[in-house]
Image (spheres, rainbow, N blue to C red):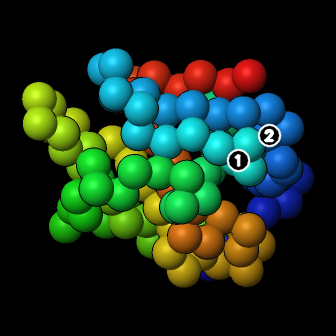
């Protein structure tokens, strides 16, 4: 486990604006309670409460990845009657203490979904 610091900063703050996630034209999630995680030189990611998502359109994947700053990420596919988007969503279900605020929240890949902020 690595701790965020000056060489690899991580900040988490309320997004402060509504966030909507679309797959094609279908709404997958919407919330006013998103958190934005900014990590080092990576693009910021919006983490939405799980209850903000239509979980009937998400199917758990067997894929997992590991981040030394955040822990193990679980993945979900977006599955609807007319599409399947592989591993479009990730979640840290038991993150490291430095990023505990994102526990159980969902983040969506912007190249696989459309994320509308504001």
Q: Is residue 5 visible?
A: yes
Q: Is 99 displayed left or right of 82 in the figure?
A: right
Q: Are marks 1 and 2 in contact (CB under 8 Å)?
A: yes
Indicate whether 63 appears above or below 53: below
Task: Residue 25: give its label.
Answer: none
Which residue is most to the left? Answer: 82
Which SS class for mark 1? loop
Residue 71: x and y in percent read 53, 72
Residues packed near mark 2 inside 10 Å, few (<14), some (14 to 19) or many (20 plus)? some
Give the residue pinned by disc 1.
Answer: 34
Residue at image location 73% in from the left, 80% down from the top: 97
Residue 70: x and y in percent read 60, 67
Q: Is residue 40 visible?
A: no
Distance from disc 1 to disc 2, alpha carbons, whole Å, reads: 6 Å
Give the residue pinned by disc 2.
Answer: 15
Residue 38: x and y in percent read 74, 43
Q: Nearer the viewer, residue 52 or 45?
A: 52
Q: Nearer the viewer, residue 10 or 25?
A: 25
Residue at image location 36% in from the left, 57% down from the top: 55
Residue at image location 31% in from the left, 20% down from the top: 24
The first of marks 1 and 2 along the sequence is: 2
Q: Nearer the viewer, residue 12 or 114?
A: 114
Residues packed near mark 1 inside 10 Å, few (<14), some (14 to 19) or many (20 plus)? many
């Amino acid at each position: 486990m690595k701790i965020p610091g000056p060489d690899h900063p991580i900040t988490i703050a309320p997004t402060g604006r509504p966030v909507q996630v679309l797959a094609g034209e279908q709404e997958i999630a919407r919330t006013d309670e998103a958190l934005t995680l900014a990590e080092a030189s990576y693009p910021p990611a919006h983490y939405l409460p799980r209850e903000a998502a239509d979980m009937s359109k998400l199917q758990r994947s067997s894929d997992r990845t590991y981040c030394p700053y955040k822990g193990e990420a679980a993945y979900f596919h977006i599955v609807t009657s007319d599409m399947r988007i592989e591993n479009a969503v990730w979640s840290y279900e038991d993150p490291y203490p430095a990023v505990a605020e994102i526990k159980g929240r969902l983040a969506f890949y912007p190249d696989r979904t459309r994320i509308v902020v504001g």
